[in-house]
Amino acid sequence: MPEPDLLTADEAAELLRISRRTLDGHVARGDIAYISVGLGEKRTRKRFDPADIDRFRERQRRVEAPPPATPSCRRRKEVPAVEIVDFKALLEERRAARRTAREAAQKATRRSR
């Protein structure tokens, strides 16, 4: 019969307020120590010492610290020059240039005939 102060896996999970599956994951990674009870060779019966649970809880304790202060970047007073492009006008210029080149080529072929 196990000692009365040892906890079953379900009791340990309940004490930590996590699921049994999460507890099994911590045990598999070696985060939580357990005591093997019984003579089972295929599946051992695991019992948990409350002191081990407390140790695990202390190792998991975290404190969120604010990020270290970084010097603020001052904005430049100069505003970069922005060029506004009229794409329709640009397209018309290109079309006009092609038209004049085409017309010049047609005139040249007419003269050579």
Image (cartoon, helix red, strand yellow):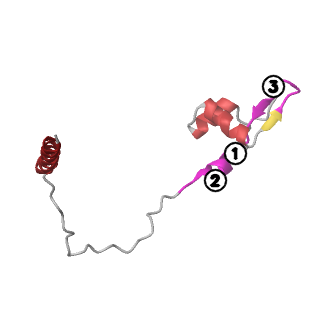
In this view, which residue lies farthest toward the front? 113
Q: Quick one: SS at disc 3?
A: loop
Say which element carries label 1. Answer: loop
Q: Between 102 and 109, which is closer to the camera in this rendering? A: 109
The residue tagged 3 is: 43
Labels 1 and 3 touching (C-beta < 8 A): no
Occupied quadrant, residue 22:
top right
Q: With 55 as the anchor, is 85 left or right in this view?
A: left
Residue drawn 68% across the image and 33% down it: 24
Q: Secondary structure at mark 2?
A: helix
Give the mark count: 3
Q: Which mark is residue 4?
A: none
Residue 43 at x, y percent in the picture: 81, 25
Residue shown at 43%/63% (left/top)?
A: 66
State the CA–CA distance, disc 1 to disc 3.
19 Å
Which amino acid, mark 1?
A: Asp
Q: Is residue 51 above or below residue 37?
A: below
Which residue is denoted by mark 1 in the rendering?
31
Q: Amino acid at mark 3?
A: Arg
Residue in the foreground of this view, choosing between 113 and 96: 113
Quadrant where the image shows the C terminus: top left
Q: Position of residue 58 (x, y in %)?
A: 62, 53
Q: Is residue 55 left or right of residue 84?
A: right
Q: Which residues are drawn in magenta? A: 37-62
| Residue that appears at 15% across and 51% down | 90
Residue at mark 2 to residue at mark 3: CA–CA distance: 28 Å
The 10 Å Cα crowd at callout 1, few under 14, some 14 to 19, many 20 or more, is some
In the picture of the structure, the residue carrying the numbered disc 2 is 59
Who comes first in sequence, dot 2 or dot 1?
1
Image quarter of the N terminus: top right
